[in-house]
């Protein structure tokens, strides 16, 4: 692993109330590892993803209202029982289900 990646952030993908993930975040914090915790249930309404894959590695930004992380700097992803993406309630079926499936596929495919 390159020096650049070894110091990069860890993504913690989980639901809001998850005591096991809390322990992981606490331990990473103790070890001075940068962490971005988020729930896929907040995507795409309050979490945004901007990605380019012109050449390896992926380049882009995952962001919410308070923080962001560059994807090419991420060293690891801890994935534990997040919610499904939530698309706008104003979208009618079957487009709403399709939009949710596409949001999940795009986000997880990138991570």
Image (spheres, helix red, strand yellow):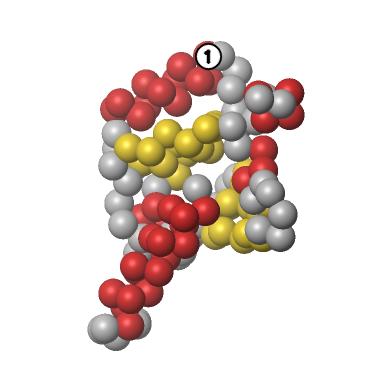
Outermost residue on the top side: it is 30
**Is 36 located above or below residue 101 in the figure?**
above
**Residue hosting label 1:** 30
Counting from the top left corner in percent of width and height, residue 85 is at: 36, 60
Image quarter hosting the N terminus: top right
> In the figure, residue 9 lies in which quadrant?
top right
Counting from the top left corner in percent of width and height, residue 44 is at: 46, 64
In the picture provided, is 21 more to the left or to the right than 106?
A: left
Res. 77 in view: yes
Outermost residue on the left side: it is 93
Counting from the top left corner in percent of width and height, residue 56 is at: 68, 49
* CA neighbours of label 1 inside 10 A, class few (<14), some (14 to 19), many (20+): few
Relative depth, front residue between 10 and 65: 10
**Is 31 located above or below residue 99 in the figure?**
above
Res. 89 in view: no
Q: Secondary structure at mark 1?
A: helix
> In the figure, residue 78 lies in which quadrant?
top left
- Look at 47% across and 62% down and name the residue there: 106
- Look at 43% across and 53% down and name the residue there: 108
- Look at 45% across and 25% down and name the residue there: 25
In the picture provided, is 60 more to the left or to the right than 65?
A: right
């Amino acid at each position: 692993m390159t020096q650049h990646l070894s110091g990069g952030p860890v993504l913690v993908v989980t639901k809001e109330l998850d005591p096991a993930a809390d322990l992981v975040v606490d331990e990473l914090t103790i070890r001075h590892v940068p962490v971005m915790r988020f729930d896929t249930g907040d995507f795409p309404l309050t979490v945004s993803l901007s990605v380019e894959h012109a050449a390896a590695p992926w380049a882009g930004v995952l962001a919410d209202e308070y923080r962001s992380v560059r994807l090419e700097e991420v060293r690891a992803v801890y994935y534990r029982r997040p919610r499904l993406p939530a698309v706008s309630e104003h979208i009618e079926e079957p487009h709403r289900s399709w939009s949710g499936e596409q949001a999940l596929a795009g986000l997880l495919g990138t991570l």
